[in-house]
Amino acid sequence: MDKLIIRGGNPLLGTIHVSGAKNAALPCIAAALLTEDQVILENIPQVRDIETTRKLLAAMGAEVELGYGRAQHRTTISCKNLAAPEASYELVKTMRASTLVLGPLVARCGRARVSLPGGCAIGARPIDLHIKGLERLGAKIVQDHGYVEASAERLKGAEIIFDKITVTGTEDLLMAATLADGETVMQNCAREPEVADLADLLNKMGARIEGAGTPTIRIKGVPKLYGAKHSIIPDRIEAATFIIAGALTGGDLNVEDCDPTHLDALMQKLQECGVKTTSTKHSVRVMGDNPLKATDIVTEEYPGFPTDMQAQFMALATQAEGTSVITENIFENRFMHAQELVRMGANIKIEGRRAVVRGKTPLSAAAVLASDLRASASLVLAALVADGETIIDRVYHIDRGYENIEGKFKGVGAQIRRIGEMLPKRHGAGS
């Protein structure tokens, strides 16, 4: 099992590039299931969840071709023959986004069998909103032995009102409704940029979608979708992680290939912390020469402060003068990184859904454990300013959503390296 070893104390200086958004790429790959034609996706990040999704489509009978050399971030998908519309537990146990194939498979094949999702330990992400929506569209649903089985001759347009805002639920039902008979109106939809990016691809494929990125989305079903070429939007969470890294280390960092309009909530909070930034259309420069000041955050659905940045902001708060209160409203079990930060010297007290962070406290190196994707990013950030050499275990979590994070940080001055688990030497055949 790989570990990251980080020696803190270096300001990050130079330019760092943002990859395509994992959370936009996953539904766009699933959207390829809706057509027998070729779908070409560009700016695909090379991360573990993407690799798992490619294997998932290939297991169903899809042809998934990866680009090489300069085209290494391109994936070409042809779902002409879907012999097995099933997502097995073995394939999806490591990721949360497996439910994204449910809607497309029912819409295209008339049936689907999908394992309930796995992934990281940050709390429940109920699939019931997906199931309710598909039933509204006319699908018959059976849950049995950890699988959801759905069937329908052809889905029919309907009005769907989400009880709770759900990103994957919005995306799953948006895809399903594109091939439904009639018009579907979905209300209380997720407004994330990744939803709008998916709708952009679907419209290129011949779908008729209006309102993606707003609370109300209208979809006029069509009999067939076609091939398309699409470039995935930049990863706003990776960009935000790099911006915080620049501020935290007192660096001067240019974060390139991002979309600053997707980062408004974070940029507002960084301004409150005294962080200096300037933006262009595709980049943010962060200058960490001001002392950091404490501020409070409350995680909310987009366009509010993202839950996926809560852990990284907590690392920043440990180095800010004063007391910051962090309230987590999206997931019920997303403070597991706090105890690891405390091991490094942070002063953090958990009170239910609130974390009270008292700064500024010097951090010192320790052996720490990554518990989920964004928690592992917060430990990397803390290690960049800690005294000594921090060892982060279970970095497979970070590989699910960050492409070559050690290479990118090393390129701007961080002392960071990856090591594999040392295997014991064998002494003779019987040992």
Image (cartoon, helix red, strand yellow):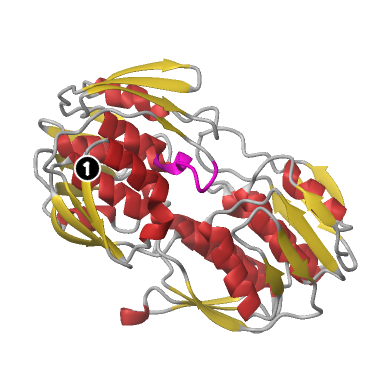
Q: Inspect this view and state whether residue 228 appears.
A: yes
Is 312 on the left or on the right of 148, as rendered? left
Task: Name the one closer to the observer, 125 or 85.
Answer: 125
Total marks shown come to 1
Is 351 on the left or on the right of 64, as rendered? left
Q: Residue at x 29, y 58 (%)?
A: 404
Is 302 on the left or on the right of 408, as rendered? right
Residues shaded magenta:
301-309
Q: Say which residue label 1 marks.
A: 275
Please identify the quarter of the rendering in which residue 186 is found: bottom right
Q: How crowded is mark 1: few (under 14 residues within 10 Å), some or many (20 or more)?
A: many
Q: Residue at x 11, y 43 (%)?
A: 289
Q: Which amino acid does label 1 sit on?
A: Val
Quadrant in which the N terminus appears = top left
Question: Would you say residue 307 sits in the magenta stretch?
Answer: yes
Please identify the quarter of the rendering in which residue 204 is found: bottom right
Q: Residue at x 34, y 58 (%)?
A: 403
Quadrant in which the C terminus appears = top left
Question: Would you say residue 399 sits in the magenta stretch?
Answer: no
* Percent x, y of residue 429: 31, 44
Secondary structure character of the magenta stretch overall? loop
* Percent x, y of residue 244: 27, 44
Task: Name the one closer to the observer, 311 or 364.
Answer: 311
